[in-house]
Image (cartoon, rainbow, N blue to C red):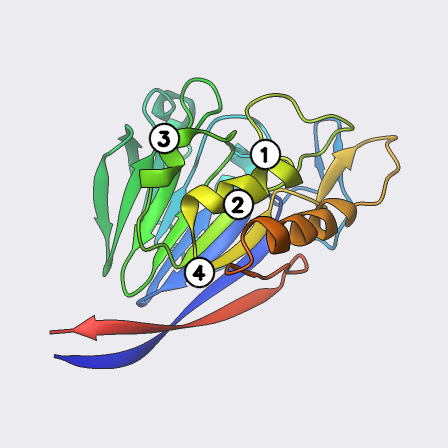
Amino acid sequence: MRFDLYLARITWIGHSTVLIELDGVRLLTDPVFRPHVLHLRRVTAAAEPPDGVDAVLVSHAHYDHLDINSLTQVSGAARVVVPAGIAKRLRGWADDIVEVDVGDELEVGAVSVTATAAEHGRHAVGFVVTGSARIYFAGDTDLFDGMRELAPGLDVALLPIAGWGPRLPPGHLDPARAAQALQLLRPRIVVPIHWGTYTRIGLSRDETAPARRFAELAATHAPDVEVHVLPVGGSLDIPVEACVR
């Protein structure tokens, strides 16, 4: 048995769009690059679609997570993975579409991707990516007890902490509930997402407030979890000690 040092990289492109690079595989979550999405406007720098994406992971079909225009800009995407019941919306827009239910697992290069439960109505999932590290992308979800068994030995959690309007409806995590989720998930590292990127047209507010509040609450509720608040477009390199037999 020997131990090698691998490197995972997380790049937050904005809102729920994250580029996960692990073991030579590039996965993109919920791609949305538009400056405007219906009644939302992007309040951060414009986003460019990354190249060489191996698979796109779509958590659910709400317009700020599944955007056909943005999806078609992702070059080199071998597969588009969506919750069961969503594929019909993408016919003619993507060539290789895979539907998944909770518990389904597929291989993408050297990593496996497992669909997980999400508390966000019908046709919503999260994803756990497993290779030399284990990374959880929650999509949109509320707090639920099943998080305790969702992903044991979790290295990184990509956790939503806010939204785009003045109020957050059920089915979402606000900073307080996201901090409570850390107590259930017990990741080594958390990167807050789904905040500070889009806001409702005409709404003026401090877009950085949710991240500051989450960091404060996480320090209280889960002090052993490293909180990395990234700027939109920012990356986090994660050294991973992987066991090789």
Q: Helix, strand or loop at disc 2?
A: strand
Q: CA distance from mark 2 to mark 1?
A: 8 Å
Point out the tag, 4 or 2, that comes first from the N-terminus: 2
- Circle nearer the viewer, 1 or 4: 4
Element type where label 3 sits in the image: loop
- In front here: 197 or 116? 116
Q: Residues within 10 Å of mark 4 (few under 14, many from 20)?
A: some
Q: CA distance from mark 4 to mark 2?
A: 13 Å
Badge 2 crowding class, 10 Å Cα cut-off, few under 14, some 14 to 19, many 20 or more, is many
In screen coordinates, is 139 left or right of 155?
A: right
Q: Is residue 209 left or right of residue 149?
A: right
Quarter of the image that includes the N terminus: bottom left
N-terminal of the two: label 1 or label 4?
A: 1
Disc on the earlier residue, 2 or 1:
2
- The picture places residue 153, in percent across and down from the top left corner, at 32, 55
Residue 117's disc is 3
Of the two numbered discs 3 and 4 on the same chain, state the one appearing first in sequence. Answer: 3
Q: CA distance from mark 3 to mark 1?
A: 15 Å
Q: Position of residue 106 (x, y in %)?
A: 22, 44
In front: mark 4 or mark 2? 4
The three-letter amino acid code for the residue at tag 4 is Arg
Residue corresponding to mark 2: 159
The residue that mark 4 highlights is 188
> Label 3, label 4: how many angstroms apart (C-alpha)?
21 Å
Q: Which residue is mark 1?
A: 173
Disc number lying in front (3 or 4): 4
The answer to whether 50 is drawn above or below residue 167 in the figure is below
